[in-house]
Amino acid sequence: MIELQVPLGERSYPVLVGAGARHRLLELLPVGVRRAAVVTQEAIGWDVDPGVEHQVFTIGEGEDAKHLGTVEDLCRDLAQWGFTRGDVVVAVGGGVVTDVAGFVAAVYHRGVPVVHVPTTLLGQVDAAIGGKTGVNLPEGKNLVGAYWQPSAVLCDTEVLGTLPPREYRSGLGEMAKYAFLGVDRLPDLPLDEAVAACVRCKADVVASDEREGGRRAILNYGHTLAHAIETEGGYDLRHGEAVAVGLVYAAEVARRLRRIDDDRVAEHRRVVAGYDLPLAVPAGLDPQRLVDLFSRDKKAVRGVTFVLDGPDGVEPVAVADRALLLDALEACRAPT
Ligand code: NAD
């Protein structure tokens, strides 16, 4: 078992990575906790044993379940059960479950402890780490939320065995991102070590900038194009697959700005292809429309802010040259 820390002073917490990590739940519950509310989904099919009195609460599937109505339902269930700050929420699921359960933990009684047991690869390398929680509004994704750090995270790699292949691939897209954020030789590592290396990288970034005042934005590497593709909708790409295309695109943009050379672009393509992820923007998407969408990204503060690789590593960069953005898109077109 690999044991890591997210170092945040008094709010530091352990992250365990490895097969069977979920069995360590009891020892990682906050001291003196009386009861546990386990929040999960029917489809997940993995139980945890908190070792204290507990009840299981299931939520619906997908982005449609990630809304304020689900938060209200869960809070009411907890209130009817007499849940207090001496109890703990345990989220068992992918990013949808940990985002919703984490947000419930942030707001119920103005904050109760939460332990995450992420069951998707994307959850283990990304969503369950770092304390961002929240839900969608009809107006957009993740528009309501809170920073609420968990008290522990258990990344049990055994549970990834039942993940549908598309979901696994989606996680690989987020994983590929870390290969460019300083995790060396990531594709060569065994799964447990690869997950742990990504967690270590995210923990380091979060520790330096918990509330995304600056550096944390690098975790959005590859996401500007990914969000534009997802906003256009109707294309059969999971989030991590769209991020994979976004990584290649970001490299093409960076090369045109002379921030990186051809070899580094080739490395992006090699890593993404090595994970069997898509390299090209789905056919049929209008490049002009995609570039229009870049500037509407929630993370775009002024104009189009891209996260780009360069001599000093990956960092946010303002890009004003529309022709350059279109030209880089051309380099990411599927062959016809
Ligand atoms: P998801 O939570 O929808 O899970 C994908 C599917 O896999 C679901 O149908 C789920 O029921 C099923 N599943 C989960 N674990 C399983 C298992 N072990 N075996 C079989 N089936 C299983 O999707 P996701 O990709 O994990 O998360 C996406 C969400 O995460 C998005 O809403 C995104 O906004 C959020 N997210 C949050 C952060 C953050 O920092 N908070 C970061 C990245 C993504």
Image (tube, grey):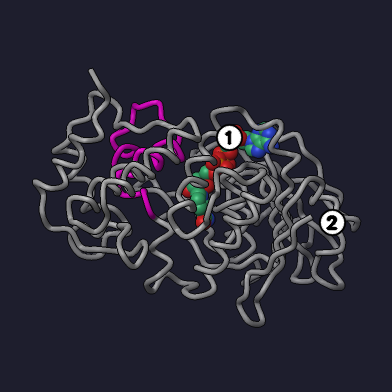
Q: Is residue 133 above or below residue 206?
A: above
* Residue 303 badge: none
Circle 1 packing at 10 Å, graded few (<14), some (14-19), many (20+), is: some
Give residue 311's position: percent from left, percent from top: 31, 64
**Which residue is at the front of the view, 85 or 173?**
173
Q: Residue at x 66, y 82 (%)?
A: 10
Give residue 121's position: percent from left, percent from top: 61, 43
Q: Is residue 101 left or right of residue 157?
A: left
Give residue 26's position: percent from left, percent from top: 86, 59
Please give the residue where the numbered disc 2 appears in the rendered image. Answer: 24
Please give the residue where the numbered disc 1 appears in the rendered image. Answer: 168
Q: Is residue 62 magenta?
A: no
Mark 1 falls on what kind of element?
helix
Q: Quadrant of ligand 1?
A: top right
Q: Which residues are magenta?
A: 221-245
**Quarter of the C terminus within the rendering:** top left
Q: Residue at x 69, y 48 (%)?
A: 192
Q: Residue at x 53, y 40 (%)?
A: 172
Corner quadrant of residue 30: bottom right
Q: Is residue 278 left or right of residue 122?
A: left
- Of callouts 2 and 1, the N-terminal one: 2
At label 2, the amino acid type is Arg
Circle 2 packing at 10 Å, graded few (<14), some (14-19), many (20+), is: some
For the residues labelled 2 and 1, the Cα–Cα distance comes to 24 Å
**Quarter of the N terminus within the rendering:** bottom right
Mark 2 falls on what kind of element?
helix
